[in-house]
Amino acid sequence: MRLIAAGRNDRRSHRFPRATRSAAGSNSTRKRGVKVSSDLIIARDLARYFPLGGGLFTKPTAWVKAVDGVSFSVRKGESFGVVGESGCGKTTLGQMIVRLLEPTAGQVLFKGDDITHLNRRELSPFRQKIQIIFQDPYSSLDPRMTVTSIITEPLLAHGKPTKAHRRQVAADLMKKVGLRPDDQKKFPHEFSGGQRQRIGIARALCVRPELIVADEPVSALDVSIQAQVINLLGDLRDEFGLSYIFISHDISVVEHICDRIAVMYLGGIVEVAPTELFISDQRHPYSATLLAAVPRPDPNHRIQPAAMEGDVPSPIDPPPGCPFHPRCEHAFDRCRNEKPKLINVTDEHAVACFLNDGQGGVK
């Protein structure tokens, strides 16, 4: 199924129709033909704290807990979505996976190898296998470089390719992402936002990675262009056997392209489930609120969002107990005093919420 800009008229209609998929996590072949098998990358108790105040000879006065104890895995050939409001730690998490940020604590394992504390030389072969697509197609491309130089820049970090080879690689990748190879000598300002993001995608593909972290890759684009880029990412996944960690605040986008969805809130994961199961049976009140807030294309049916009062608490001074309890209409005494752990409610569905101690989903 192709992604289109129009929505559909089901109970939770999003802007985009969903592709049919098998349950994520099984070692079966998906409808699109990509084999989902063993874990490609594993994050264990990842944390990243940023210091506030202090100086060269003084200690920080406080710490921003941007990511606080996050664990998950991504299987080979799988698209894993990470969703949540701005400031929940999604981008910080993605940057730790590709080692643009050093974790304060925890581990990142790629195919069983611990890459958490490797130096630049040791990390080089892994960087070929893990690439990133940045959110902003305007600031992420060097305005002084031609398209050929931008796309093939990763090659220079892993060898000394000839100019002819770089031109050929750039031409091939430009075709793959829907750009004209004749435009190789142009500069970023000569392209639209959607075209610039395609250049960024081509750059990520240059060294034939196995995993791509896509950090809000369509949020800066018009809706019609978003659909084109999402379709392109899906096609490239099928052609190259890619795995994605797809970061977004927009569940309607993540729902289409991802096999599993993880919901982040205040630096932690509060729910993980296969996409179809998540959409039909989300168990965390925050997940239910996010889904209820998605606009529907049918003007005759208005969504009544689940109650969620107040602002997101500060990551400098998070509330005791469950971090969501100050905004949750279902909160009770245990929520205010004890932080729930992420536990399995089924083999593939995990939730950090005391409402799920033997109880059903959030209605």
Image: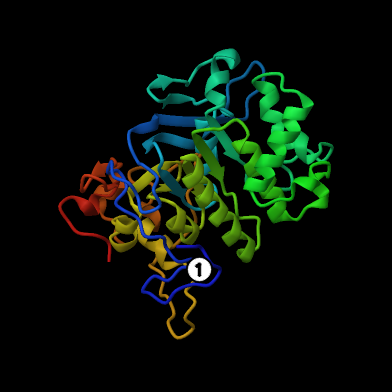
The answer to whether residue 184 is left or right of residue 87 is right
Residue located at (18% from left, 50% from top): 357
Count how many numbered circles sit on residues in the image: 1
Disc 1 is placed on an element classified as loop
Judging from the image, the colouring scheme is rainbow
Farthest-out residue, left = 358
Residue indicated by mark 1 = 15
Vertical relation: 203 (above or below) 105: below
Judging depth in this view, the residue of 303 and 78 nearest the camera is: 78
Farthest-out residue, bottom = 300
Judging depth in this view, the residue of 319 and 156 nearest the camera is: 156
Judging depth in this view, the residue of 58 and 143 nearest the camera is: 143
Vertical relation: 293 (above or below) 166: below
The answer to whether one can see residue 158 in this image is yes
Give percent across and percent down for residue 188: 79, 46
The answer to whether residue 137 is left or right of residue 330 is right
Quadrant of image for the N terminus: bottom left
Crowd tier of the residue under label 1, counting other residues whose Cα lies within 10 Å: few below 14, some 14–19, many 20 or above: many
The answer to whether residue 361 is left or right of residue 89 is left
Residue located at (21% from left, 44% from top): 347
Give percent across and percent down for residue 63: 53, 32
Vertical relation: 85 (above or below) 239: below
Residue located at (60% from left, 37% from top): 205
Give percent across and percent down for residue 107: 42, 24
The answer to whether one can see residue 151 in this image is no
- Quadrant in which residue 330 is drawn: bottom left
Give percent across and percent down for residue 67: 47, 36
The answer to whether residue 60 is left or right of residue 264 is right
Q: What residue type is labelled 1?
A: Arg
Quadrant of image for the C terminus: bottom left
- Quadrant in which residue 43 is drawn: top left
Judging depth in this view, the residue of 269 and 31 nearest the camera is: 31
